[in-house]
Amino acid sequence: MSNSVAGLAGRLELVSGDITRLQIDAIVNAANAQLAGGGGVDGAIHAAAGPAVLEECRRIVAAQGICPAGNAVITGAGRLPARHIIHAVGPIWHGGGVHEAEQLAGAYRSSLQLATEHGVKSIAFPNISTGVYHYPKQAAANIAIATVCDYLLTHAVPGHVVFCCHDAENIALYRERLAALGT
């Protein structure tokens, strides 16, 4: 698999910084099940995007109910430079015994599926579930990278995936993991 993954090098990028400032088709929000904004990256994205995005999220929840862990929905991006926000709900860490890994992989996979369905050519992911949801950062990075790589091996869209890390620890974890894969 590593030879195949090494071929993805041109499609994967690691950046440090503020995901709300990226000039990209879609950013992924580490959302809560109510799509109501909150702390961390979720709060930062909602604050930067403006009230129109929160209103769109409220309409989605009114129509379909909460968004369970492992799933995602797509909205406009409000005042952000991106075209879309994909709100992915990651799991709350409970020690690893209640399907957290499957739910986290599902959040990444659901986001990528929505990106493909909506013709999103470039997408940026934050470190889903590693903030207030306390998912261990190393395990989360491994799941994120493996899930994205597996998806990209069988899909041409999105053509460019950015892992946007806000802290030095996650940057180091992602850099090490991507280097080990030869990307």
Image (tube, grey):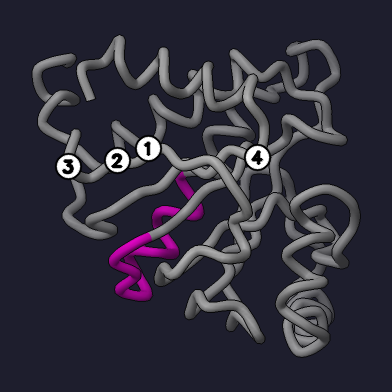
Residue 25 position within the rendered picture, expressed as x and y whole percent measured from the top left: 40, 71
Question: Is 15 on the left-hand or right-hand side of 60?
Answer: left
Q: CA distance from mark 1 to mark 4?
A: 19 Å
Residue picked out by circle 1? 148
Q: Earlier in the sequence, mark 3 or mark 4?
A: 3
Which residue in the structure is indicated by mark 4? 166
Report the amino acid beneath label 2. Leu
Q: Is residue 21 left or right of residue 59?
A: left
Q: Mark 4: which secondary structure?
A: loop
Residue at disc 3, secondary structure: helix
C-alpha span from label 4 to label 2 = 17 Å
Residue 10 - label: 3
Magenta extent: 109-122
Label 2: few (<14), some (14–19) or many (≥20) C-alpha neighbours in 10 Å: many
Tell me the chief SS of the magenta region. helix
Q: Amino acid at mark 1?
A: Val
Write down the residue under mark 2: 12
Left or right of 72? Residue 130 is right
Q: Position of residue 50 (x, y in %)?
A: 78, 83
Residue 162 appears left or right of 67: left
Kindly indicate the quadrant of the structure image that contains residue 47. bottom right
Label 1 element class: helix
Mark 1, mark 4: which one is toward the viewer? 4
Q: Amino acid at mark 4?
A: His
- Note whether 133 is above or below 112 in the view shown: above
